[in-house]
């Protein structure tokens, strides 16, 4: 009941915010060259050497308060891009706004994708009627753990990478920001397979939240792009990647704008550590019952504007892009 009350309060506390003055916000389409498409919430899609990488999309976006949630197949059909060449789907955590649409998308759009995520997401996707259990890999067990006691453990262990075609990726122990007033209303994990998909919002338990380091490789397996992805804000050092001995820096950091006020030094500490060339801001829009055919607004009851202004002033050399859902962003030119 508590979650319902808080969600109602959240709804009353603030209408979606106007984006006036909140630059940069881009809305580009049909770009040529290396690019990534923002799908809204935590969803992103890119192609590299003809193979797709999908970061768990969410289109259903039930209206507030989301108490009982089901995938909206019509909304998915309206907005889900072509994805039959997607081979990898990465899932940071198992809340409904990241996992609810994944089963239907894996069955009907990304039929050649394998999903990688935490144990809880695996137990949800193992619902027998979905027939997806063989298409999920639990990467939580080999994630890089940020709690370190020896200098050696700050280095990446090569076995923590998973390589698929011209990509490789590594799960990193991260953390889920509290939703409101320091509270995470959807915490918890599953330890065995579910019989049927959850409907009650609180049964989309998050599990261990993962960040990902993603390398897009050339024909010699050298990284051309290194991308850091998070689908939830976190306190440092959660989500911080290990040292990679090849000297390649992170080109693109994909951050989560939601709940940044509920953690400390986000994304500042991570920006200072990674020094990416480009910062992509996701999960910024008010997605509760939103209409993707209209321009969305900032999340309600959040102080994202202050965070965005602070970050854009403090980290000027970094190209900061907050794209509209379903629009594209050009990746920076590869470094030699
Ligand atoms: Zn979440």
Image: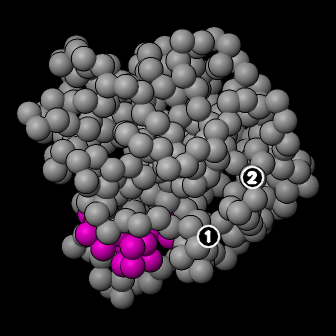
Indicate how the structure is coloured in the image. one colour
Mark 2, residue position:
296
Residue 112, magenta (yes or no) = yes
Residue 128 appears in view: yes
Question: Where in the figure is residue 168, as x and y percent of width and height?
Answer: 22, 42
Image quarter of the N terminus:
bottom right
* Residue matched to label 1: 60
Please tell me which residue is depicted at 80% across the width and 39% down the height of the picture. Answer: 19
What range of the chain is rendered magenta? 99-114
> Closer to the observer: label 1 or label 2?
2
SS category of the residue bearing label 2 = loop
Which residue is more in the foreground, 288 or 187?
288
> In terms of image quadrants, where is residue 36?
top left
The answer to whether the beta carbon of the residue marked 1 is less than 8 Å from any atom of ligand 1 is no
Side of 158 relative to 197 (left or right): left
Cα–Cα gap, marks 1 and 2: 15 Å
Residue 143 in view here: no
Q: Residue furthest bottom?
A: 129
* Residue positioned 36% across, 88% down in the render: 129
Q: Would you say 222 lies left or right of 278 here?
A: left
Q: Which mark is residue 212?
A: none
Density class for disc 1 (Cα within 10 Å; few <14, some 14-19, many ≥20) is many
First along the sequence among labels 1 and 2: 1
């Amino acid at each position: 009941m508590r979650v319902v009350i808080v969600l109602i309060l959240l709804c009353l506390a603030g209408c979606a915010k106007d984006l006036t003055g909140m630059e940069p916000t881009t809305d580009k389409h049909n770009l040529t060259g290396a690019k990534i498409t923002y799908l809204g919430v935590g969803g992103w899609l890119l192609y590299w050497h003809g193979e797709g990488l999908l970061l768990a999309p969410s289109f259903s976006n039930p209206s507030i308060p989301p108490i009982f949630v089901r995938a909206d197949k019509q909304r998915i059909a309206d907005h889900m891009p072509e994805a039959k060449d997607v081979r990898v789907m990465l899932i940071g955590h198992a809340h409904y706004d990241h996992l609810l649409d994944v089963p239907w998308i894996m069955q009907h759009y990304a039929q050649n994708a394998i999903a990688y995520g935490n144990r809880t997401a695996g137990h949800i996707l193992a619902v027998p009627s979905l027939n997806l259990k063989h298409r999920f890999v639990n990467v939580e067990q080999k994630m890089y753990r940020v709690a370190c006691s020896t200098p050696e453990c700050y280095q990446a262990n090569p076995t923590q990478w998973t390589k698929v075609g011209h990509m490789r990726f590594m799960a990193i122990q991260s953390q889920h920001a509290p939703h409101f007033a320091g509270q995470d209303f959807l915490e918890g994990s599953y330890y065995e397979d579910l019989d049927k998909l959850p409907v009650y919002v609180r049964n989309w338990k998050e599990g261990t939240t993962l960040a990902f380091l993603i390398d897009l490789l050339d024909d010699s397996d050298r990284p051309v792009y290194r991308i850091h992805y998070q689908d939830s804000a976190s306190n440092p050092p959660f989500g911080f990647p290990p040292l990679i001995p090849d000297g390649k820096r992170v080109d693109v950091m994909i951050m989560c704008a939601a709940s940044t006020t509920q953690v400390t030094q986000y994304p500042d500490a991570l920006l200072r550590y990674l020094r990416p060339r480009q910062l992509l801001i996701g999960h910024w829009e008010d997605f509760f019952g939103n209409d993707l055919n209209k321009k969305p607004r900032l999340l309600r009851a959040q102080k994202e504007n202050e965070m965005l202004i602070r970050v854009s002033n403090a980290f000027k050399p970094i190209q900061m892009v907050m794209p509209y859902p379903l629009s594209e962003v050009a990746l920076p030119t590869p470094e030699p």
